[in-house]
Image: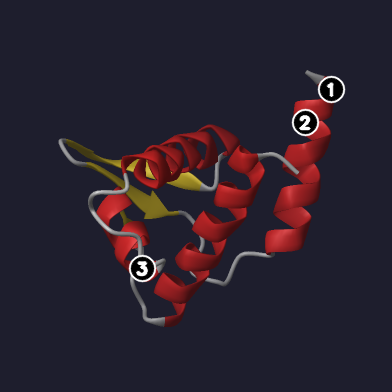
Amino acid sequence: MDFFLAHLRETLEAINKLIDNNVYRVDTKRIRRCNHVKSSDRSKINFIWRSLEYLKLEGILEINGSYHPKTYNIKTKQKLDIDEIMINIEGNRSLS
């Protein structure tokens, strides 16, 4: 498993935590706080925003209309099945 997929899994787990707390609007800062990532850790922050952008392209998130900072709405109100999403993404990435 590469770094991107590992951070993508962490991002999906953080999104599930936010859904548990009835939060359906996601941005990099909320994911960072949920995963206890320091604001000085730019590498992990870059992985988080890349993961959010990838989840938007996969149809799990949709852009809220705010571009600075980019804010996304979670399309479903139910918890995400992380294992199923990861299998689909790994399959799509191996085909590319």
Write down the residue under mark 3. Answer: 36
Write down the residue under mark 2. Answer: 92
Percent position of residue 81, x then y:
69, 65
User: Could you give the CA–CA distance between mark 1 and mark 3, rounded to whole angstroms?
Assistant: 33 Å
Inspect the image, locate mark 1, and give the three-letter code of the amino acid beneath it.
Leu
Write down the residue under mark 1. Answer: 95
Q: Quadrant of the C terminus?
A: top right
Percent position of residue 30, x then y:
29, 61
Residue furthest toward the front?
40
Q: Residues within 10 Å of mark 3 (few under 14, many from 20)?
A: few
Percent position of residue 34, x then y:
37, 69
Residue found 49% across the figure and 41% down from its top:
51
- Name the side, left or right, on which 96 lies relative to 2: right
Tell me, for residue 10, which label it has, or none.
none
Task: Describe the element under mark 1 as helix, strand or loop.
Answer: helix
Q: Residues within 10 Å of mark 1 (few under 14, many from 20)?
A: few
Q: Nearer the viewer, residue 67 or 93?
A: 93
User: Could you give the CA–CA distance between mark 3 and mark 2, rounded to whole angstroms?
Assistant: 30 Å
Q: Earlier in the sequence, mark 3 or mark 2?
A: 3
Q: Quadrant of the N terminus?
A: top right
- Name the side, left or right, on which 6 lies relative to 23: right
Residue found 78% across the figure and 43% down from its top:
88
Q: Residues within 10 Å of mark 2 (few under 14, many from 20)?
A: few
C-beta proximity under 8 Å, tags 1 and 2: yes
Inspect the image, locate mark 3, and give the three-letter code of the amino acid beneath it.
His
Q: Earlier in the sequence, mark 1 or mark 3?
A: 3
